[in-house]
Image: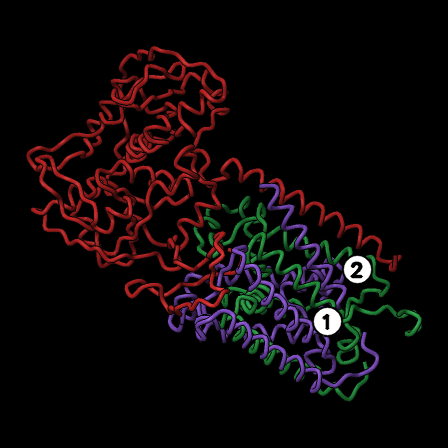
Chain colours: A purple, B red, C green
Amino acid sequence: MITKILLGLFSGVAFGFVIQRVGASDPNRMTRAHLMIDADIPRFMLAAVALSAAGLFGLQAVGVGRTMVLPTSLVATGLAAAIFGIGWGLCGYCPGTTWAAVGEGRLDAVFALAGGLAGAMVFAHLHERLIPLLYDPTNLGQLTVTGLVGNHALALAVVLVGLGAAIYLIGRIWHHDTPSE
Amino acid sequence: MTNGKHTLRYFILATLLLLGVAWSLSAAQENRHGGYPNNDLLATTQWLKQHIGDHDLIVVDVRTDAHFDGRLIPGAIRLPWSLFRYNNTALNEGSLFVGVDRAQDILGKHGIGRTHTIVLYDAVARDGGATASYPFWVLDVLGHPNKRILEGGIDAWEAAGFDLVSKPRQASPILYQAPMEEIRGRELIDGDDVYRQLGDTHYQIIDVRSPAEYKGEKGTRDLQGNALKLGHIPTAVNIDYTLNWRDPQSKKIKPYSALQNLYRGLDPQKSVIVYCNSGRRSSFSYFVLRLMGIDSVTTYEPSWKQWGKPANFFPVETTVHRLAGGDLPGTSSAAKGTRSATAGGASTRQKASPDGNTPKAGYVSCGG
Amino acid sequence: MEQQNSNKPRYWNWLPAAFALAGVIVFVFATYGPPASSSGFVSALKGAWSSLAPDYIASKAHYRMIPGPGSWLFAFILGMAIGGFIGGRTFKKPVTDIPPLWRRRFGDDATRRYTATFLGGFLILFASRLAGGCTLGLFISGSTQLALSGLYFGVVIFAFAMLTARLVYGNATKEVS
């Protein structure tokens, strides 16, 4: 039981450290990414996903690892993503970076954390009403690219190509102002 | 180091982070000892050892003669759980609850009173708490305030190094009187009650028998030896009572987080009805759900011995149902140690829903 | 590296950092499962409320789906904060309470910034819980598993974030940060 706590701590510390060091916990940097003047953070995220997807493929090939695919609910996932994007664009924090930013000592992140706790609490209170209303009706199930394409390796290749293209395009489209912080 | 002027902030932050770690570790420790919402319904051997001298504590060995091995926890009385049941030969329904009046009679004859704290126990062999849970259920129906089941039964007591005795305590009969308002008679539902609310989505029915019995592959018989119908009550889901245990050898109850996972999908706003064949196994799931803090749970005690009787003409199903968001295949899959996993190029079939009859995957959350 | 930029500390380059993060993520998949962060908020709430209002917590489906503080999940988000702490304390760049971009657009009023972040935090968490995850739990973990929900979520959050940032900050591309 203690092991899993230590494991979680260790994983979290490594994770938080990396995102601090790359500047993802810096709301200024994140906002610059959203304003399309700093391409590094988006490319960082997409590249991390691509590499992790490849890594997970490797894990599953040797029978290691636990997965859990979240369902796609057209309405709920989409609506939630919209609301999320608005909040993210407004403050420059997302739930994960909030924790790291608070650790970093950013005071505005502390307020984001407080707001986050409030938001989670409100949702948890309304869960029983909102989920049947928004989530269940257009729930398509736990769809994956692998399921669509039929083959894990092929699906991985498709996704990697897609992510690679996105990374390239972002590098081209986002203007880079000097100096980047 | 950068900010000299913000030293206080970082000091507070560091303190909070360390406190957070301590909180997490202590919560994890608590989880080891169950940490159930209704912990008071469970007695650990340590707790019993401490309280065994209390004058209002009664320890009850519920094992029937067939499973009694001549050893008891010191001071325990013997009260075989089967005393609370009878066979209704006229109706041809077996293993029915004797009723609240007779139950109080039985308790009183064994020296148990309303104000006693009752600790029930059985053995791992029979059946890891799943026979002690039957008298527990009876006491719950009677509204008896203080009762517990001993975690791990007599085997845990022995393993802890405590003494056993070979003679049960002889208790003098007293009057067990449960005030009428405190008896929860509405919990004694029968087939007609269940039948009436089949269409009512307010109820969730859990069949705690084995999957084979649930699916109608394995059946049971009535008092005359005739086969009862095969299948389960319509809309019921199947959560085998043995899943409440960590493993079938120790029969220790799963920790709270694992139980939450097992019963994931259970709607706390709705009432739960549990049943099995005779009402014994379901009394254990009843106990576990109560341990988890779910109070609106009822045992359909006559269970399949009544529902499956052809002459009762109750509807029967064999389609498999699952709780929405409950244990779906592929919801969370741990890769087994085989080298033939999907990565090699084997094709996987996309399923929008696990099988035609069940609801699609309900809400699933990350981190859960 | 620091000499080039007159001693200004630089964040890590994005590509090696991506390798580092992917390493952590794959480690997490191997030892636990898909990493998550929004549910960490629920875990913290569950822990806090359990002592004050245990019946409420036991009766709410959302809290029952998420473990309490004695879990890998809570330790993970706590670890993220600790990682941020260690990172921050060993990084030469001072931390700002109000980002320069905001400062330039809205001035130095701290209350305004803190209100905005409170509101922003509210929205992101409310939304994450509706979708079942956030950038990490849905987008990153999901896309790593090639899940459509993750990709769908990721595209939409970026689109709306970019739109919102543009609305909030005006056309900042002309300004040099």
Q: Residues within 10 Å of mark 1 (few under 14, many from 20)?
A: some
Q: Along the polypeptide, which appears first: circle 2 or circle 1?
A: 1
Q: Which mark is residue C15?
A: 1
Foreground mark, 2 or 1?
A: 1
Residue where numbered disc 2 is placed: C88
Which image quadrant for residue A72? bottom left
Residue B244 versus residue A123 in the image, above or below: above
Along the viewing direction, whichever of C11 and C173 lies nearer the viewer? C11
Q: Tag 2: Cα neighbours inside 10 Å, few (<14), some, or many (≥20)?
A: many
Taking the image as shown, residue C10 lies to the left or right of residue B209, namely: right
Residue at 36% x, 59% y is B324
Give x and y (percent) for residue A59. 56, 59
Horizontal relation, residue A33 to residue C48: left or right: right
The residue under the point 27% across, 44% down is B209
Please tell me which residue lies in front, C105 or A142: A142
Give the residue type that dot 1 points to: Leu
2 and 1 marks on the same chain: yes
Above or below: residue C161 compared with residue C71: below
Residue at 39% in and 25% down:
B119
Rendered position, B256 above or below A142: above
